[in-house]
Amino acid sequence: MRLPTVLQFAHSLLEQTVQTGDDAIDATVGNGHDTVFLASLVGKSGRVFGFDIQKTAIENTKKRLHAHGLIDRVTLFQTSHECVKKFVSPYTKKIKAAIFNLGYLPGGDKSIVTKPSSTLKAVKAIYAMLEEGGRIVLVVYPGHEGGREEKDELLAYARTIDQREAHVLKYEYINQVNDPPFVICIEKRMGEHR
């Protein structure tokens, strides 16, 4: 058995957490791969809330969701993920999981990238809505313009989270060149451990 890629590992973290009927967030829908994955996990009684600032990303995600027959499980917002609380709160107060696939839209304009300030605002807002035992999974790509700054700020924030409140994990391959991607997972601890 081979070691999982960062994306496979990220999906396994979600798969272990999300069940039928849960609410989840795809904070960066991109081309819709993570959105489809989450929509398959939440089932017909759950909901996925997807965010992206690019119209192309929203359109690509809608097409992918239609192709998989999952569009009715997803609400998409063409806005920054930093607005997550404003847009998700009317629907639900508790989120079981969220994923961020940071950087730029694959196949899109590489000058449009996620920014540390909006990403951190979104992570903090989602953490406040996260159910006990819920997870935020961030796939971090430090190799693009601004990627290292985002990486540094996310890691600095993650290190400040009180271990009595959450478990924070970093999964990475340490012998790869060219700033390989890695995963940060924040899991809110259950009440008896807090």
Image (cartoon, helix red, strand yellow):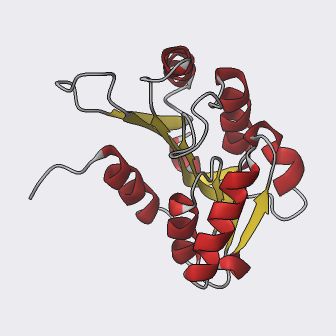
Q: Is residue 125 left or right of residue 7?
A: right
Residue under the point 80% across and 58% down: 93
Q: Is residue 53 visible?
A: yes
- Name the one closer to the observer, 104 or 21: 104
The image shows residue 68, relative to residue 119, as above or below, that is below
Query: 170 or 194, which lies in front?
Result: 170
Quarter of the image where the N terminus is located:
bottom left
State the image coordinates of residue 130 (x, y, percent, origin top left). 66, 50
- Is residue 21 visible to us here? no
User: Which quarter of the figure has residue 80?
Assistant: top right
Residue 72: % across, % down = 72, 81
* Residue appearing at x 73%, y 46% in the figure: 54
Quarter-wise, where is residue 95 in the image? Answer: bottom right
Choose top left, top right, bottom left or bottom right for residue 44: bottom right
Q: Residue at x 44, y 31 (%)?
A: 141
Outermost residue toward the left? 1
User: Is residue 117 positioned above or below 67 on the image?
Assistant: above
The percent coordinates of residue 133 (x first, y second) are: 53, 54
